[in-house]
Amino acid sequence: MKKVKNEKKDEIDILEYIYQIAKMNQENVGRILNLRCIEDQIEVLLKEKLNSYKKIAYSARSMLIRRKRKVKDITIATKMATYLSVKKELLKDSSSKKIIQLLYEASIVSKEELNRYMSFVQINSKTILNICNRLLSYENNNILGYKKILNR
């Protein structure tokens, strides 16, 4: 019985974690879109990324609600820190290449953190494994895409 409780707790924890990652990355991309005039090609890419993070966050949120859990949104302090960090970085260099570099680094961190987190939890739910793999796959694709842009 205790193992089942731990598995359920792990599943809730990972859903909360995925929600937080997706919301943070959504916030990050949204801040970049709001802070400067961006080349059309980059703006289209960023809007696509923003929508993908929204979908992942929404999926994790829905899974938490179905499990009768309160959804913990990112704090105002976290949002402010994201805003200031992005603004600071783009004040130094607001080129499209710098924007892609910031997003590339954020995707690497998200992927590494989620992999590390998943190595510590027990997940048996196929739907939860699916959303974990969806976010990992999305971040892998982001990393490859950003790397391709940076190497041009």
Image (cartoon, rainbow, N blue to C red):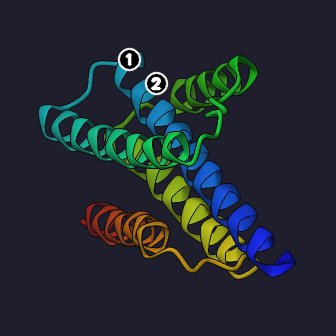
Image vertical order of residue 39 relative to residue 147, above or below: above
Compared with residue 45, is residue 143 higher up or lower down, i.e. above or below? below
Q: Position of residue 96 (x, y in %)?
A: 32, 40
Q: Quadrant of the N terminus?
A: bottom right
Q: Amino acid at mark 1?
A: Asn
Which residue shows up at 49% across the image and 45% down it? 66
Q: CA distance from mark 1 to mark 2?
A: 5 Å
Task: Return the residue at label 2.
Answer: 31
Tell whether 124 sits left or right of 43. right
The image quarter containing residue 80 is top right
Q: Secondary structure at mark 2?
A: helix
22 on left or right of 82: left
- Under circle 1, the secondary element is helix
Q: Residue at x 56, y 54 (%)?
A: 18
Residue situated in front as seen by the camera: 137 or 72: 72
Q: Position of residue 25 (x, y in %)?
A: 49, 42
Q: Quadrant where the C terminus lies?
A: bottom left
Q: Nearer the viewer, residue 50 or 93?
A: 50
Q: Which residue is mark 1?
A: 34
Q: Residue 5's x, y, as percent?
A: 78, 68
